[in-house]
Image (spheres, grey):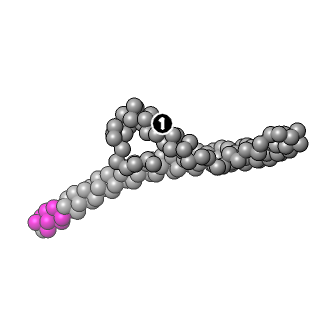
Amino acid sequence: MSDDYGYQVRRLETRTGGVEYELHSLRSKLGEAEDLDYELRDIRGDVRSLEDDLSTVRNELTELDDDVRGHIQDTDQTLKRLTGRIQALEAHLLAAGGAPRADLDTIDPEWMKLARTASHGWHVRSGSMPRYPAHNFT
């Protein structure tokens, strides 16, 4: 009968060793899960922080958009006033008599040629173009 008890004791010791190993393994996994839980909290905090930053940026962009729209409207109004003043000056000059009407959109071809030659000279002088042009500017 003592052999029966010895066998049962060894079997219990083996089972106890297996249970201890499982307990150690579970504690290790629990530690890893706690670490992951902390990391998850950090990530959630970072996400909240980024969402707050994004909200701030959106608000700033909205304010900037409003400012730009205001500046565009102001510029448009100023341009309309300036156009009106120029038209009034032109009418005043024409009414004064003797003032030739200037067409600033039409340029004499000789002046265009001179302007191209001068521009080419400046580019050559700055070193951004070769000395001799690849095509004729006439």
The percent coordinates of residue 109 (x first, y second) are: 56, 48
Q: Where on the picture, by quarter, is residue 122? A: top left
Mark 1 Cα shell of 10 Å, populated few (<14), some (14-19), many (≥20): few
Q: Where is residue 28 in the image (x, y as percent from the top left)?
A: 32, 51
Judging from the image, what secondary structure is the residue with disc 1 in?
helix
Q: Which of 25 and 54 is in front in this view?
A: 54
Is residue 14 positioned above or below 111 on the image?
Answer: below
Relative placement, left or right, of 7 versus 67 is: left
Residue where numbered disc 1 is placed: 118
Camera-side residue: 50 or 10? 50
- Quadrant location of residue 112? top right
Query: Does residue 116 show up?
Result: yes
Q: Which amino acid does label 1 sit on?
A: Ala
Residue 132 is situated, as x and y percent measured from the top left of the image, at 33, 41
Q: How many marks can you see? A: 1
**Residue 53 lies in the magenta-colored region:** no
Q: Which region is colored magenta?
A: 2-12
Question: Residue 105's x, y, as percent?
Answer: 66, 49
Is 131 above or below relative to 31?
A: above
Magenta residues, dominant SS class: helix
Q: Does the magenta stretch include residue 7?
A: yes
Furthest-front residue in view? 98
Q: Is residue 10 left or right of residue 93?
A: left
Image-based side of 63 in relation to 127, left or right: right
Q: In this view, does 128 lie above or below 138?
A: above
Residue depicted at 16% across the width and 61% down the height:
10
